[in-house]
Image (cartoon, rainbow, N blue to C red):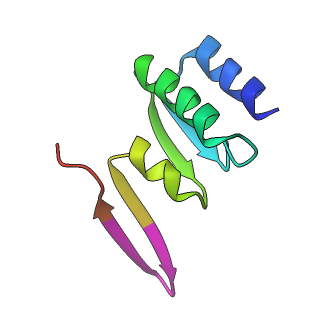
Amino acid sequence: MQRLCFARLFYLQPKYAVLDEATSALTEDAEGQMYRGCKQLGMTLVSLGHRSSLEKYHDVSLKLCGEGRWELTKLKEE
C-alpha cells in the first residue's frame, strides 16, 4: 500500500507532499529508493515519522516538545 502511494506521487508529481509514516512498512533500502525518486522529481517533502533513517533525506527537523514548545534543527549544511 505504501509503494502504491509513492507511485501516485511519482505520477502526479506535486511540488509539495506531506508524508505521515509513509515508509514504516518498507525496508530502509526501499525507503531510500522512494525518497530519492521524489527528490529527482523536484518534490519538497514534509515527513512525519519515528525512523531516524528519515533524517538523511531532509534538511531540517522540527520536534514538537509539548506545552507549545518546539525545536528546529538544521540537519544539513546548505
Main SS, magenta residues: strand
Q: In the rendered image of this protein, does residue 63 appear above or below residue 28?
A: below
Q: In terms of depth relative to the viewer, which is nearer, 32 or 17?
A: 32
Residue 49 x %, y %: 60, 56
Tell me what residue is drawn at x 30 percent, y 55 percent. Answer: 75
Image check: 56 left or right of 1?
left
Seen as rendered, the residue at the extreme top is 11
From this viewpoint, which residue is outermost toward the left? Answer: 78
| Quarter of the N terminus within the rendering | top right
**Residue 64 among those drawn in magenta:** yes
State the residue in front, 12 or 37: 37
Question: Which segment did they paint magenta?
Answer: 63-72
In this rendering, position of residue 53 left or right of residue 1: left
Quarter of the image for residue 34 reads top right
Residue 28 appears at what percent x and percent y? 60, 42
Q: Is residue 43 above or below residue 10?
A: below
Q: Is residue 55 magenta?
A: no
